[in-house]
Amino acid sequence: MKPATDNAVSRQIEQVLDQIRPAIRADGGDVQFVGFDEATGGVEVRMVGACYACPMSMATLRAGIEQRLRMVVPEVRAVEAVE
């Protein structure tokens, strides 16, 4: 996975994450953008704070973050959490 870079897709991903962050932070967690692989459409994020060990973090990742990113940024095909 390539590190987060300052290109148009990465900026779009960050903008979407900025929209989602208030809800995640309200529960004591956060999400950090790690990188985007243009070849596969894969996004890597790091769940931190309360989200790191929360059993619902995978639901948040799939139903919240991935779904929203795929709707707004057509280049995104999948989102994976990394440590």
Image (spheres, rainbow, N blue to C red):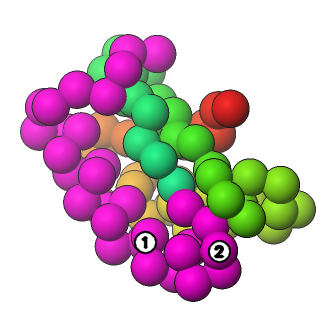
Using residue 19 as the reference point, say whether residue 22 is left or right of it: right
What residue do we see at 32% from left, 28% from top?
A: 4
Q: Is the residue marked by circle 2 packed among few (<14), some (14-19), or many (20+) residues within 10 Å?
A: few
- Determine which residue is flagged by label 2: 28
Task: Give 46 or 79, whichever is nearer the viewer.
Answer: 46
| Residue 80 in picture, x, y percent from top left | 61, 37
Q: Are marks 2 and 1 in contact (CB under 8 Å)?
A: no
The quarter of the picture where the C terminus appears is top right
Using residue 35 as the reference point, say whether residue 16 is left or right of it: left
What residue do we see at 24% from left, 60% from top?
A: 15
> In the rendered structure, which amino acid carries the disc numbered 1?
Ile
Q: Is 16 inside the magenta-drawn segment?
A: yes
> In the rendered structure, which amino acid carries the disc numbered 2?
Gly
User: Which dot marks residue 20?
Assistant: 1
Which residues are the magenta region? 1-30
Task: Give 65 or 49, whichever is nearer the viewer.
Answer: 49
Q: Is 52 inside the magenta-drawn segment?
A: no
| Residue 75 in picture, x, y percent from top left | 30, 38
Does 64 appear above or below 10?
A: below
Q: Is the residue marked by circle 1 packed among few (<14), some (14-19), or many (20+) residues within 10 Å?
A: some
Q: Where, by quadrant of the figure, is residue 30 drawn? A: bottom right
> Seen from this angle, which residue lies furthest right?
55
Q: What's the magenta bit mostly, secondary-structure-wise?
A: helix
